[in-house]
Amino acid sequence: MRKNIGKIKSERLRTRARRKLSIRATLFGNADKPRVSVTKTNKNLFVQVIDDISSQTLFSVQTFGKNGIPGTCGNRESAKKVGAEVGALLKARKIQQAVFDRSGYKFTGVVAALAEGIRESGIKV
C-alpha cells in the first residue's frame, strides 16, 4: 500500500494517493466495527466491508457484476441504494457501527450519498 508518491505522474492521482495514505493511517476496522471502503469510477461504485484484524473482506456490494444491484450506476441515487444495501447486510450480521474509509475521495456527491444511505439504515458511521 505504501506506494512511492513521487512515481505517480498525474498530479491529481498523486494528491489522492497522499490523501488516501494519511486517511488510512488513522482508520482501523475490527469484527465489531468493520471498515467500509469505497472505490468509485465515473460509471460504477464498489464498496467493501473489511475486518482489518483478520485481513478479510466480510462482503462487498457494487453496481456491477454478480453482487451488483440491478439498475444502478455511479450517480448519487445509486449510491444511496448501495448504501442502503450495505446497511441491510451489516444489520443482518448484527453490526451496529462501522468506520467509513473514503479512500482519498472528497466527502461530497456520491461518497457523501453513500454514507448517508448507510446512516439511514441505522448504522453509525
Image (spheres, rainbow, N blue to C red):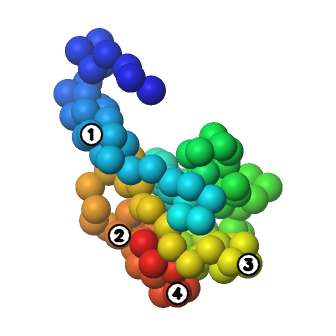
- Residue marked by disc 2: 112
Find disc 3 in the rendering and name its residue. 92
Percent x, y for residue 13?
Answer: 29, 32
Specify which label sits upstream in the sequence, 3 or 4. 3
- Number of the front mark, 1 or 2: 1
Please state which amino acid type lies under the numbered disc 3: Ala
Q: Depth check: 50 or 82 in front? A: 50
Q: Residue 36: x percent and y percent?
A: 51, 59
Q: Which of 85 and 75 is in front in this view?
A: 85
**Which mark, residue 122?**
4
Q: Earlier in the sequence, mark 2 or mark 3?
A: 3
Query: How far, Cα to Cα, is label 3 from label 4?
Result: 12 Å
Residue 119 in view of the camera: yes
Which mark sits nearer the N-terminus, 1 or 2? 1
Question: Which of the marked residues, 4 or 1, is nearer the chain's N terminus?
Answer: 1
- Distance from label 1 to label 2 (Cα)? 19 Å
Q: In this view, does 76 lie to the left or right of 29?
A: left
